[in-house]
Image (cartoon, rainbow, N blue to C red):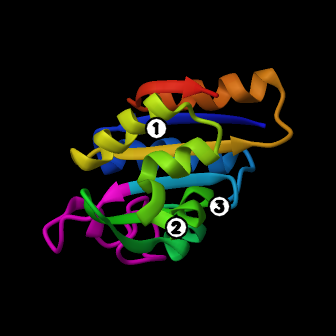
Amino acid sequence: MSTVIGVFDDKESAESALREIEDLGFTEEEISLIAKDDGEDSPYMDQNLADGAATGGAIGGLAGIAASLGALTIPGIGPILAAGPIAAGLTGVAAGGIAGSLVDMGIPRERGDYYENEVKSGKILAAVDLMDADEDEIEDIASIFRDNGANDVEIH
């Protein structure tokens, strides 16, 4: 299994990238998202911009993921919104936080710590778990992330 991971500075860039990835046939079971929830004024709490499918969705246009978006509080970070496989790993959040969940997905600990700090600073973390993808599909996902402005795009 490979995981493509990246950090977006804004909601619109993350939405655009994840919409393209969904158009390739990937589902909410493969796409993860984590964003800090700073309350009512947070840009992540806007009404779904693409089709009105969900409120409180950090990714707007992806109705399935937005519908599964859950609010959690992580010690040291505060409230976050999370969806996809990474959200499932956050149920034991007290033990490992975002970094611990990323380690469970095969991301090295030091990179997990880095990505956790990026979310803490208000950025949006997106990841795609690729179970049976070939090298071309993996590179396509990484390219979509980069083309939509993701920083620190890595393949693990």
Residue 65 is labelled as: none
Q: Secondary structure at mark 1?
A: helix
Query: What segment is highlighted magenta in the picture?
Result: 35-60
Magenta portion: prevailing SS class:
loop
Q: Residue at x 65, y 36 (%)?
A: 3
Residue positioned most to the left: 41
**Tag in front: 2 or 3:** 2
Q: Amino acid at mark 2?
A: Gly
Q: Quadrant of residue 40?
A: bottom left
Q: Residue at x 63, y 43 (%)?
A: 128
Residue 112 is labelled as: 1
Q: Position of residue 48 (x, y in %)?
A: 38, 69
Q: Work out whether mark 2 precedes mark 1 in sequence or the reverse, and give the earlier one.
A: 2
**Tag in front: 1 or 3:** 1
The residue labelled by disc 2 is: 92
Q: Amino acid at mark 1?
A: Gly
Q: Is residue 84 left or right of residue 69?
A: right
Q: Work out whether mark 1 precedes mark 3 in sequence or the reverse, and give the earlier one.
A: 3
| Residue 47 colored in magenta in the image | yes
Q: Quadrant of residue 37?
A: bottom left
Q: Is residue 46 left or right of residue 106?
A: left
- The vertical placement of 67 against 38, above or below, is below
